[in-house]
Amino acid sequence: MKVFKIEDYIIKKILLVSILAFILFPISDSIPLLFTQNTPYLKLLLDEGILWEYLFNTLELVFKVGIFSIILGFVSSYIVTMYDFKYKRVFKILLTLPLAFPVYVGAYTYSSIFYTNSWLSSIFKNDFFMNGSVFIYGIFLYPYIYLACRSYLQNNLIEYVEASRTLGKSPIETFVKVVLPLSWPSIVGSVLFVIFETLSDFAVVEYYGIGTISKVITDSWMGLGQKDTAAKASMVLLFTLAIIIFLEKMLRRRKRYEGISSRKMKTEKPSKGVTVAIYLFLGMIIALGFVFPLYEMLGFVVSKSSYIGNIGLVEITLNTLFTLFIAITLIIIFASIFASVVNQLKSGKRFFSTIGVIGYSIPSLILALSVYTFIFSLDNTFYETFHIESIVLTDTRIALIVAFIIKFISIAFSNYSNTLAKINSNVFNASTMLGYNFIGTFFKVNVPILKKSTKFVFILLFIDLIKELTLTYSLRPFNFKTLSTEIYRYAGNEMIEVAAIPSLVIVGVCIIMILYLEIGGKNVKNRKA
């Protein structure tokens, strides 16, 4: 029995170390670039204060996006949780659908709407919205906050709200003095995901002409080929992000309100005036985040329908799907193994769980640079060792798939970890007593337990990966075309109407997936943890 225990320990150790190495090695491979001599371009950015100006713009952008998305996401979640009004279920579903739009698709579509609608053009010119970029990020990313806060309000605040009502507090007093303070940890935690998505995107700020740190990275790396300058600019952004995360942890420390209730929140019937205000507010959000851009996109597709056969839509769609299925399959395999190993650890669970989700918190442009540096160094090693005169890895999808795994394994890992944590440990101990080692237990016990979760994990991964532009554009092999890269290429050539054709494929598929998750009864509250 001792030999078996040692063997089982070694198996888990090897699996754990292998997955950690797979995640951490590519991320850390660009660190040596930080210690190179500053290039003339970087010196110019520092001497002229351009780098600090772009950093300030980045901070201003994420702050305003956070405020705007909180207003949209939290208020809408409060309304659908606390009030009972006609067509409420339809509104609840429609409020999630802006997630079907990649932010860059929303930016390209709204470029036409801004110029043709006098009321919306004021948003484009407004300083708060920074040429419209804050509006784009907020209107298409607020569902992260809406979904998280809707779940939190439904399950955690019933007793607090009922106590406030019993004491005779008005709805406004209850909102200000009870709901908002108690929901603040959930709000701050979910707004972080909006910030992550904002920092990971480069197409929106580039299209609307906002100078941010991502512009320095793209200009240095893709424009000038200066990976070291891009790496140093990345550190400025990572340091800023670390401060934001640290402040978020400080705000949430000792402010977690638990106590999930099995009872449903007792909703109120609003007055006629409040009902009108609810319909106007929610209707405006749905119109701006879903109806207007979808209508505009459909109009573009109809006007340029003759291009459908010329742009190779079937080929790029199949190319996209093939890459996605490879990445998703590997993510599910790695995440299920990783979560199973971590679940059986007696100590260090918090540390390894943090590693499992670290990839999502890294802006995509920085992750792309790190993975590219790592894969390129492997190619150089192959050349020096085997004298292969071609870039074996860099010229394939390997770099892209590696980046996908590191970035999005957190989605699968979080879901699997939550599922396994609910299972009594005696189930796994019984398997050990019956003579199965970790591998046997994994296939006999863990895989059947995780089977149901895998269906939803697959859908969540599919939605995120099909929308991903930054990693795909940065790490794709030469002449490699996907739906997202073709959207970016056509939009960059001022062919917005043609870009709407592949955009509609992404949006249409994502709408179907989101509707399945919502109507199928699987809330996406654990979408990313």
Image (cartoon, rainbow, N blue to C red):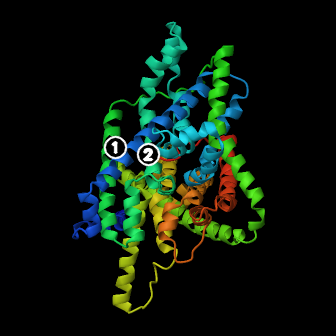
Q: Residue at x 42, y 44 (%)?
A: 61
Check disc 2: other Cα within 10 Å, few if <14, some if 14-19, many if 20+. Answer: many
- On screen, residue 476 versus residue 19, left or right, reads right
**Residue 302, above or below 170:** below
Which disc number belongs to residue 195? 2
| Residue 100 in the figure: left or right of residue 310 | left
In this rendering, the answer to whether 454 lies above or below 120 is: below
Expressed as whole percent of the image width and height from the top left, the position of residue 118 reads 63, 39
Q: Position of residue 411 (x, y in %)?
A: 50, 52
Mark 1 or mark 2: whose residue is earlier in sequence: 2
Mark sitting on residue 244: 1
The answer to whether the residue labelled 1 contacts the one labelled 2, judged by CB atoms less than 8 Å apart, is: yes
Quarter the N terminus occupies: bottom left
User: Between 317 and 57, which is closer to the camera in this rendering?
Assistant: 57
Rendered location of residue 239, percent (x, y): 29, 51
Q: Is residue 101 visible?
A: no
**Which label was assigned to residue 155?**
none
Q: How many marks?
A: 2
Is 34 displayed left or right of 378 in the figure? left
Going by the numbered disc 2, the residue's amino acid type is Ile
Amino acid carrying label 1: it is: Ile
Q: Which residue is at the front of the view, 518 or 269?
A: 269
Q: Residues within 10 Å of mark 1 (few under 14, many from 20)?
A: some
| Secondary structure of residue under mark 1 | helix
Residue under the image location 74 percent in, 67 percent down: 307
